[in-house]
Amino acid sequence: MEDIEIFQRMGLALAIGAAVGVERHWREKDEEEGSRTAGIRTFALIGLLGGVAGLLEHFLARPGGIPGIVVVGFLVTLTAVFAAFRLRKAIADENYSATSVVVAMLTFAIASAAVLGSMTVASAGGVVLVAVLASREFLHASMRKLRWSELRSAVILLALTFVVLVPSEPVSLCS
């Protein structure tokens, strides 16, 4: 990896974290200073941490070694620390949503993918993550209005689609 590519990939990792952080910060914008769990700075840093873990993985990977061990190690540590922090806040606020922990894990993983894999796929993953987060009210309202017959029809359509689209021979993702 050339230096300029490293900067581009790390910049993307940081940008993914910052984009997620803007949404998370906006969601808690009316809370008092110091009472927000994680906002733009924290998620930008999580993105940067994911990028650094990916970079370390790239440079420290040994032939015959376990692939992804550095990234997985960082991810497990981040998850444990962030979940413990969120649990304390959840108990204090009596709000037991797991979304922030999952978002932190996804932000880290997508940022790592920005360094180790396709920047296009990582960018798309970051955009999808932010879009899902920003659609909270719409998604919750849709679920309240959804009837069983509509859900059953969607499941049948999905099942038929996957039966038709699944290839008869295994496809390698590493080609």
Image: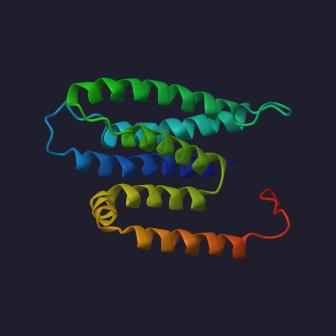
**Of residues 21 and 159, which is closer to you in this image?**
159
User: Can you give x and y, in whole percent of width and height, for residue 11 in the image?
Assistant: 49, 49
Left-right relation of 131 to 65: left
The structure residue drawn at horizontal position 16% and vertical position 33%, both measured from the top left corner, is 33
User: Can you give x and y, in whole percent of width and height, for residue 121 in the image?
Assistant: 59, 60
When asked about the image quadrant of residue 103, the answer is top left
When asked about the image quadrant of residue 158, the answer is bottom right
**Of residues 74 and 88, which is closer to you in this image?**
88
The structure residue drawn at horizontal position 15% and vertical position 39%, both measured from the top left corner, is 31
Left-right relation of 34 to 119: left
Q: Is residue 169 above or below residue 1?
A: below
User: Can you give x and y, in whole percent of width and height, for residue 37 in the image?
Assistant: 28, 34
Regarding residue 166, the answer to whether it shows in the image is yes
When asked about the image quadrant of residue 175, the answer is bottom right
**Of residues 84 and 97, which is closer to you in this image?**
97
Number of numbered markers: 0
Q: Is residue 70 above or below residue 152?
A: above
Regarding residue 3, the answer to whether it shows in the image is no
The structure residue drawn at horizontal position 27% and vertical position 25%, both measured from the top left corner, is 91
The structure residue drawn at horizontal position 44% and vertical position 24%, both measured from the top left corner, is 81
